[in-house]
Amino acid sequence: MPETLAVYRMSHNSLSCDARRMLEDGLRVIETGHSSDPRVRRPAAQHTDGLKQSGVGPTRYHYLTWCAGLVCGGGEDAVPLLELLPESPEPGLDVDLLASTLFTAVPYSQCRTTAAWPGLMTEVMPEVVRFLDALEQRAQGSHLANRILTRLQDQIALLPETLTAGKVYSRDVEVAEPLADFLTPPECDRVCLRLSLLGQPLGVLFLPVFGGLLPATVMKDAIAARFSWAILNRFFKEYLYPNLQFNRDGESLTVSRNDQVLASGIKDSSDPAAVHNAVDWTLFLQELWGFTGWTGADFYNKAPEIPSAGGGKPVREREIIHAEEELPALTGITDKTLKIDFRAGGCSLGVVEISTVDGAISAKRLLTALTINSGYELCCAVVREALV
């Protein structure tokens, strides 16, 4: 239910912000929940002794971290709160959970939401680091403080107003615009790319930085590897979908292009992802190879035959074929197979070995073999070179 049903008004003097009192009371509740309770006369057999004792330690540390976040949010030292915890090493604490807890608790102490983090960093981060160092010593977790801090900085870096969060440099990137190398602050070792495409959010990428520089080529590779399928769909929805035919038959959907069926029997047609996954691969192959009247199966079958570039091309020991050029028919091959260096946008997708028939490989057999052997990497390469 997305609607707001109730609003809780906070106060700086609220008892829920009294960290020490909250921790003392909370630890008693946690202890009670992990032990037998004489007030319960007929407990269920599985709960006679409360929750499993193996969970009491992590639960204490989790709740301690919330209370410490309240203290750090006020710019004060949260280390003394550790004195309230029993001596209990817990090296396997959930660092993602503890980082998320701090992410919420620190601004909460000031009656603010997590969106306030960019303006709180200078004031509160020294106390957060001090607490995490002490937490690592108590819990005896390997590099625990740094692992929690890294995940906390990652969450802060995702916020729209954040420029730097510790060692993370944040930047908004429109994928449809040309990418360029950019410099980062010397203290940063990672970059958070908040990606958009055609003005709409696309996703987030964290990339390492070396020497204070993030090259555009690294960004292109990473964006294409992670988001090629989503990028392809956005462009198809913008430029191809308006010319497709969508015909509903009861609860199923049929999608056609120029009266050629792309996909039929799409059940969950209200879900854009269902339509995307059903038709976009065929659209991609049609656009790539230039045969908009083919079905998806046609690209993987031997027929229909297609015209080639020229009347037949004598080949070398290893032939180079570019996806953006018209495919040739290859003739005069003396071996039973031929190795093809398949490239898209100048980048090699690998070497494909294709069997010959009477010393030749037709353009259609070449197309089918290249499509099958390159697979999804072909999509990533085309998106990287043509759309990013």
Image (spheres, rainbow, N blue to C red):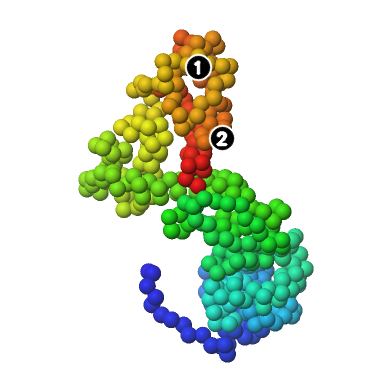
Question: Which residue is nearer to you in this view: 223 or 96?
Answer: 223
**Which disc number belongs to residue 355?**
1
Tag 2 and tag 1, C-beta contact below 8 Å: no
Residue 27 in sight: no
Indicate the quadrant where residue 300 lies: top left
Q: Residues within 10 Å of mark 2 (few under 14, many from 20)?
A: few
Q: CA distance from mark 2 to mark 1?
A: 24 Å
Indicate the quadrant where residue 52 lies: bottom right
Location of residue 5 in the rendering, given as x and y in whole percent from the top left corner: 38, 77
Vertical relation: 74 (above or below) 334: below
Vertical relation: 250 (above or below) 43: above
Location of residue 147 in the rendering, given as x and y in whole percent from the top left corner: 69, 61
What amino acid type should be assigned to the residue bearing mark 2?
A: Cys
Residue in the picture at 32% in, 46% down: 241
**Which disc number belongs to residue 14?**
none
Q: Secondary structure at mark 1?
A: strand
Question: Which residue is nearer to you in this view: 176 or 10?
Answer: 176
Residue in the picture at 25% in, 44% down: 245
The answer to whether 79 appears left or right of 198 in the picture is right
Indicate the quadrant where residue 187 lies: bottom right
Q: Which residue is disc 2 drawn over?
A: 347
